Structures are given as C-alpha cells and as structure tokens.
Image: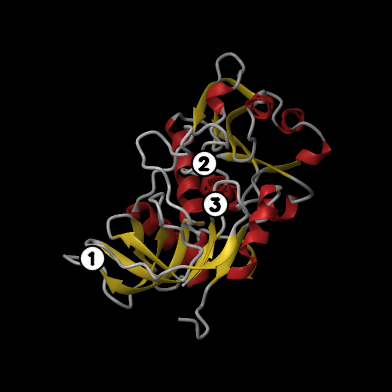
C-alpha cells in the first residue's frame, strides 16, 4: 500500500510502499478515503511520539515515558475517514462496509496517511452519520475533540471570555464556534485580516498578531483583561507567557504545545498543559453537530497523498486557515 512515512525522526516524510496491515483480534482494517493534517503529524515526525511535546523534550530513546520506542518506517497522521474492509478475530461492533471515521494512534504503526489502517474497535472510531460526508468527517476528530475538551476546561472554571491564539486553524475554528454556542465571548487572534471569517464563526473580536503583541491588542477590546487563554500556536514558554499577560488574576492560560508548565505567568493565573483524551462518544456528539450544520469544519485545501510532505512543511510555518485534507480515494490502486 501507499503511505507517507519517515525512516527516522527529523527525516523528510516520503511516499513509500508498505505491506497492507492485517487486523489483530478486536481491530478493524479501514480502507482510508481521506486523512486530515494536524500539527501533531509533523511534530511526531520530528521526534515527539505523542505529537504534543515539543521536539527535544522526549526521552533519549525518542519515546514518551511508559511507551515502547517507535518502529520505522513510521507512518504519519492520526485522523481518517473511510470504510471497514476487514474485521479482526473475535466480537466486533463494526461490519465490513461500514463508513467510519476517527483518530488512530498514538499506537506504533497506526498512521493514517496511507491506504489502509488497523484500529482497535474500542478506540476513537465511530460510524459516519447520515448527512456527513467522509471528507468533513476526516477533518473533524482531532480538531473537534480538542476544541470540545479545551472548552470544558474553560466552562468548568466559570470563565466568560476566551482569547484563542491561532484561532484560524482547525482547532481554533471549532473552538470559536463551540464557545460562542456556550455564550463565551471569544477574542480570536490570527495572522492577517480574518475579521470577516472569524466573525462568521462567532468571534466577538478578531486581532491580527502581525500588527503587534496580542496582549496589547486584547486590552483595546477587553480593557479589564481576559478570563481564559487557549494558546494553540506558541511553542516556547516565553511566547506563551507573553500572551498570558492578557489574562486577569484568577484566570487560566492553556497551552496545546506543552509549554505552560515552564512559563512564568502573571500572579494568580493558572497554567495548564492540555492533553487530548480521544473517545468515540465525543466523536458521535461532534459528528451529529457537523451533520446538522451546527458545527462547521472549515476545509482550506484538498491534496493528493503524494503532496502531503509539502503540506506538512507549510503547516510548520503556522497561519493555517482551516483544515488540510489528504485524498486517498483509491482510483484503481490496490
């Protein structure tokens, strides 16, 4: 089968031919029709197996604590949509031909930029509901689940305003919509003029980070500061702390890049390093929202599998405008 994989950490992802995987007992094999790109994909290729620790912070063997070292070639990607084409041994909640989507991994060898992927039936995988196309379903798992779980962290603490750094990407677009639906005032920080698009997603205000420090711009729209920060972009403690300066005492500053713990934050501001907890129940809820049109999943671009390495390179620079979808429709390919 075709796959985009790396032969070693920090090597360039390349199109390779690999054996078609066989599902173990309790697994399903999915013929992938679409995959979607997440920043965790290139972070994993750089040597962060969970896609959340920045490069250089993992143990010397390249594996997170308690996990076996990865096996190369390492297939890139976690999000997918497609059809079940084979069932492993034992009881299974899926059947051959089911339209499914979900998030594979971070198990070794479970990358999704490939023609086939084997996924445990009890992982974050579920049926694609009527009214939801496979392309949108593939773009939903990581971005949608991360947005929903970030929002719960904010809501549980009773916060009413939220600054989102990197709001134009997949997670930020979903988070903005979900927060607005919960009557949380969203200030969307993006690169460039995205006021119209972010406003259509529910942002109360949009600031352009290329025009100056975000914390200063936030004060112009929220003079008393912001209740909560969701920083989806900063990869250093210093950059994260600069954004957290806009958070008022008693607020929360959350990082999806694992840098909150090392940041010097304003007094009274609680730092949180976010960790995604994928589960099929949450996928069902998000998919229903997307199928009903309540949750829009903005797709920026579609690319064939062989163009995925260039897409990963572009994503490194930041400034995503929605999701990048990788197309693997199997036009005659076996």
Mark 2 highlights which residue? Answer: 48
Determine which of the numbered discs, if any, sits on residue 41 in the image.
3
Q: Residue at x 74, y 51 (%)?
A: 194
Is residue 264 depicted above or below 134 in this figure?
above
Residue 137 in the image: state x and y as whole percent: 47, 65
**Mark toward the start of the polypeptide (1 vs 2):** 2
**Residue 138's spot in the image, x, y percent?**
49, 64
Q: Residues within 10 Å of mark 3 (few under 14, many from 20)?
A: many
Residue 297, given in percent of the width and then of the height, sits at 56, 60
Residue 31 visible from this viewpoint: yes
Tell me the CA gap for discs 1 and 3.
28 Å
Which residue: 36% across, 67% down?
Answer: 21
Q: Give the residue drawn at x 29%, y 66%.
A: 23
Q: Residues within 10 Å of mark 2 (few under 14, many from 20)?
A: many
Up-down: is 9 above or below 5? above
Tag count: 3
Image point (78%, 48%), residue name: 192
User: Which element type, helix, strand or loop, lies under badge 3?
Assistant: helix
Q: Nearer the viewer, mark 2 or mark 3?
A: 2
Give the labeled residue for mark 1: 93
313 to the left or right of 150 = right
Label 2 SS: loop
């Amino acid at each position: 089968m075709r796959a985009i994989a790396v032969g070693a950490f920090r090597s360039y992802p390349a199109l390779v031919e690999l054996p078609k995987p066989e599902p173990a007992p309790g697994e399903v094999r999915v013929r992938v029709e679409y995959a979607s790109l997440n920043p965790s994909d290139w972070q994993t290729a750089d040597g962060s197996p969970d896609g959340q620790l920045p490069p250089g912070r993992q143990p010397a063997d390249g594996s997170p604590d308690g996990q076996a070292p990865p096996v190369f070639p390492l297939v890139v990607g976690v999000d997918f949509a497609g059809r079940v084409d084979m069932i492993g041994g034992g009881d299974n909640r899926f059947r051959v031909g089911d339209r499914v989507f979900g998030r594979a991994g971070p198990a070794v060898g479970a990358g999704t930029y490939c023609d086939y992927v084997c996924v445990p039936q009890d992982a974050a995988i579920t049926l694609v509901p009527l009214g939801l196309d496979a392309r949108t379903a593939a773009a939903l798992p990581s971005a949608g689940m991360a947005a929903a779980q970030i929002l719960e962290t904010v809501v549980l603490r009773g916060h009413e305003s939220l600054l989102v750094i990197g709001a134009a990407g997949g997670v930020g677009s979903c988070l903005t919509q979900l927060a607005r639906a919960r009557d949380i005032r969203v200030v969307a920080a993006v690169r460039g003029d995205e006021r119209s698009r972010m406003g259509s997603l529910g942002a109360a205000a949009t600031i352009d980070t290329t025009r100056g420090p975000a914390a200063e711009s936030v004060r112009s729209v929220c003079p008393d500061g912001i209740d909560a920060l969701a920083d989806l972009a900063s990869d250093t403690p210093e950059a994260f702390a600069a954004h957290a300066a806009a958070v008022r005492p008693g607020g929360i500053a959350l990082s999806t890049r694992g840098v909150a713990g090392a940041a010097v934050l304003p007094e009274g501001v609680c730092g949180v390093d976010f960790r995604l907890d994928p589960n099929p129940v949450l996928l069902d809820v998000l998919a229903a929202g997307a199928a009903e049109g309540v949750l829009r999943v903005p797709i920026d671009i579609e690319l064939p599998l062989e163009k995925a390495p260039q897409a990963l390179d572009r994503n490194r620079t930041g400034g995503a405008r929605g999701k990048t979808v990788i197309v693997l429709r199997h036009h005659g390919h076996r």
